[in-house]
Amino acid sequence: MDLPFDVVDLSETDHPEEGDRVPDFERPLVGPEYWEDVALSTLTDEGPVVLVFHPMDGAFPATYIWNEVRERGWLDRDDAQVVGLSISSPYEHADLLDERGVDARLYSDPGNGVAEQFDIVNDLDGMAGVEEPRPAVFVLDSERVVQYAWVASEWPAFPDYDEVEAAIDEL
């Protein structure tokens, strides 16, 4: 198949696995109308969270991921909150949510510090000094313990959405 981009193998990581407790963090959490600084633990105190790391807004993988999440109805579920995280600014997140018609909340982490904590940093080819989180999904219980983890081993890559959905169903 002749793809218009190169598929890049990513190095192995020591990312959180099932049974691990993920680190807490606080970043701006952008919604359709406003944003505010919110800790991950504040969300998990309310119940399970599906944390979706995605490439910067405007990149085709981010668009594809959020279209899939929206179309599968994950944002309408009562059993888990679905939130995203990328290096994009709050303004870029607000544009993505508006343009895609996605009623989600996305963490803004321009310094990529959360990806560093999770050991899922992706140095972007051809962009010296620019990094973002590699695509990843962590289904977390109310104690921030990983119930399901998927981290991309190549770029671009997408999670098995049926597996993620099954993990959410098991919460």
Image (cartoon, rainbow, N blue to C red):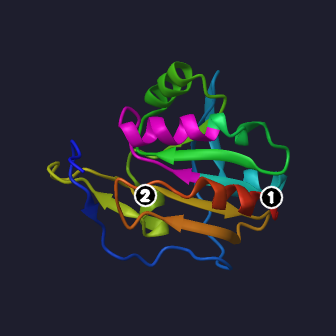
Q: How many marks?
A: 2
Question: Residue tagged by mark 2?
Answer: 113
Residue 137 position in % (x across, y down): 57, 58
Report the residue at 70% width, 63% height from top. 140
The answer for how far apart the CA atoms under marks 2 and 1 are is 30 Å
Element class at badge 2: helix
| Residue 147 coordinates in the image, percent (x, y) | 71, 70
- Which of these two is toward me, 37 or 10? 10
Mark 1 neighbour density, 10 Å: few (under 14) some (14–19) many (20 or more): few
The residues colored magenta run: 52-69
Q: Residue at x 65, y 21 (%)?
A: 33
Say whether residue 9 is magenta. no
Considering only vertical position in the picture, is 8 above or below 132? below
Q: Nearer the viewer, mark 2 or mark 1?
A: 1
**Callout 2 amino acid:** Gly
Left or right relative to 143: residue 28: left
Left/right placement of residue 171 relative to residue 84 reads: right
Callout 2–callout 1 Cβ contact below 8 Å: no
The residue to which callout 1 is attached is: 169
Name the residue type under label 1. Asp
Answer above or below: position of 23 versus 53. Answer: below
- Determine the residue positioned at 41% across, 43% down: 61
- Residue 119: where, in percent of width, then height? 43, 70
Q: Position of residue 113 (x, y in %)?
A: 43, 58
Judge the density around disc 2: few (<14), some (14-19), many (≥20) Cα neighbours within 10 Å.
some
